[in-house]
Structures are given as structure tokens and as C-alpha cells.
Image (tube, grey):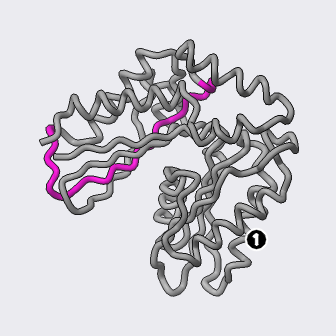
Amino acid sequence: MINKHVISEKIKKAIVEANIKINPEVEEIIERYEGPFSDIIKENYRVSKEEKLPLCQDTGIVEFFVFIGHEVKLEEPIEETLNRAVGEVYSEYPFRYSVVSDPLFERINTGTNTPAIVHIFQVKGKSLEIRFLVKGGGSENLTVLRMMTPTSDVEKVKEFVIEHIKEHGAKACPPLHVGIGIGGTADKALLLSKLALTKSFKERNKDPKYAGLEKELEKELNFLGIGFQGLGKGITVYSVHIEHFPTHIATLPVAVSVDCYLCRRGKVTFED
């Protein structure tokens, strides 16, 4: 059995680090950037790390992707453990609460940054892998789903993605990490597009056709010239990742999600 306190402490540490320490892959790219405000961007993440202050005022809603082995035993539902960890982190650190209890009528802040969003996937074995995104509102607002006709080809899919980023990309603090979900049902495609954002920039789809499409889109999106913070200098996207799934013969769902230039994410693993 995996102890709930062990899970909670590792998750808390990872969430704090994601909020105050720059993603190493992002840092590597920003250190080479010499465009407008480059010195301020670099100074920002140095101060955040030294003073344990958040990298951005929008400390987001936390979205978890839990891969739990079928032989794993837990002391309580994993969602309870994760929500408690999030509540404690956001209460103990100067992180803004970003969650409201009712989305339409009351919009009263819950005061704990909970509930978090939790997606659970059951897999074989005795391991527990928890990935998460610290998802800011600006990038989340760029999430889009299009139910394309099943006869749409690769060029139509590329056209949809490129037009969306061209029109809206500057609103989400680029450079962006772009996640694309293709197939399944409408909700599955959206979930896949989010899951794609948990990957390292250097990972590629195991299917060479999709890996090739990731590279093509990354290249073409960078031709848009949106640049850092939408100021036209530097890259527009860090990377593009695609997750795909079988779909109905009459459908072709395509979803796009993005993460802002900070790409605050993490992953922790446990063995039972």
C-alpha cells in the first residue's frame, strides 16, 4: 500500500517547484533569447527561485493525470489526497487562489485553489505515476475543439491548427507548447490534447507519421513569427505534441490545447 502522506508530500514539493522554479527545458531556450524584455524575463525567474515567489501572478488551476497500476493499493481515493495537497500548498505559499465554486452564477473563490482537475487512467502493474499541469487561465482560454469531417486530410488538420494559433496565439504568453488530440470522441480528443502537454519538448510520437506531423507543425507555427510575448522576436512555439486514438467512422475530432511560455508541469512516480 502506498502511504497517502508520502504521495501528498511528494506532490506538494513538485507543485511548489513548478510554481517557483523555471522549467529547465524552458530555461535552456530563454537563456538564448535576446529579444525585447529578455533581461526582465531572465531576472524574473532568478528572483522567483531565490525568493520562493511565483513565476507568474496566475498560479493556475492544477490538472492531474494519474496512471494507476491495477495492483496498487491506496489508503484513500487518490482525488482526496491530491486535493488536500493542492489546498495545503496554496495556503502555505503566496500563490493566488484561482478557482471559483460555481462557474456561472456565484463565482465565489473556494479559497483553497481546489478542487483540482483529476483524470485517472488505470494501467497494469504496481506503479503509480502522477503528472500535472499548473494551468493558467490565459492559455486555457485558447483550448478549442473542432469536429472535422471524416474525409478531412492532414492538410486540413494542419490548416485548422495553424489558423487557430495565428489568430489567438499571442494572447497566451508565447512561446507556446502546443498539444493536439486527434480521434476518439469530442471529450477524448480534448483530454488527449491536454495529456500531450505533459510531455518533454524533446519527446516524439512513437508513430513516425504523427512524429513527422509534429515536426511539420512546429516548423510552420514558428514561421508565423508571433515570437516571445507576441512581440515578433524569437520562436513562437517550443514544441508540438500529438496524441491520437481510434474514432468512429463518421467523425474526426481534433482538439488543440496550449501551455504558456512557463510550461509549469511535473511528474512523480511511486511503487507499491
- Residue 103 appears in the figure: no
Q: Which residue is at the front of the view, 8 or 199?
A: 199
* Element marked by disc 1: helix
Q: Position of residue 230 (x, y in %)?
A: 82, 42
User: Label 1 sits on what residue type?
Assistant: Glu
Look at the image and tell me in which quarter the N terminus lies. top left
* Displayed quadrant of residue 32: top right
Q: How many labels does the image show?
A: 1
**Is residue 33 shown left or right of residue 148?**
right
* Displayed quadrant of residue 246: bottom left
Q: In this view, does 243 lie above or below 174?
A: below
* Displayed quadrant of residue 164: bottom right
Q: Is residue 232 above or below residue 161?
A: above
Residue ID for mark 1? 159
Residue range (magenta):
55-75
* Residue 57 counted in the magenta span: yes
Q: Position of residue 210 (x, y in %)?
A: 58, 73
- Residue 107 appears in the figure: yes
**Is residue 122 shown left or right of residue 61?**
left
Q: Where is residue 172 in the image (x, y as percent from the top left)?
A: 71, 42
- Identify the residue at horizontal 41%, vertical 37% (top origin): 116
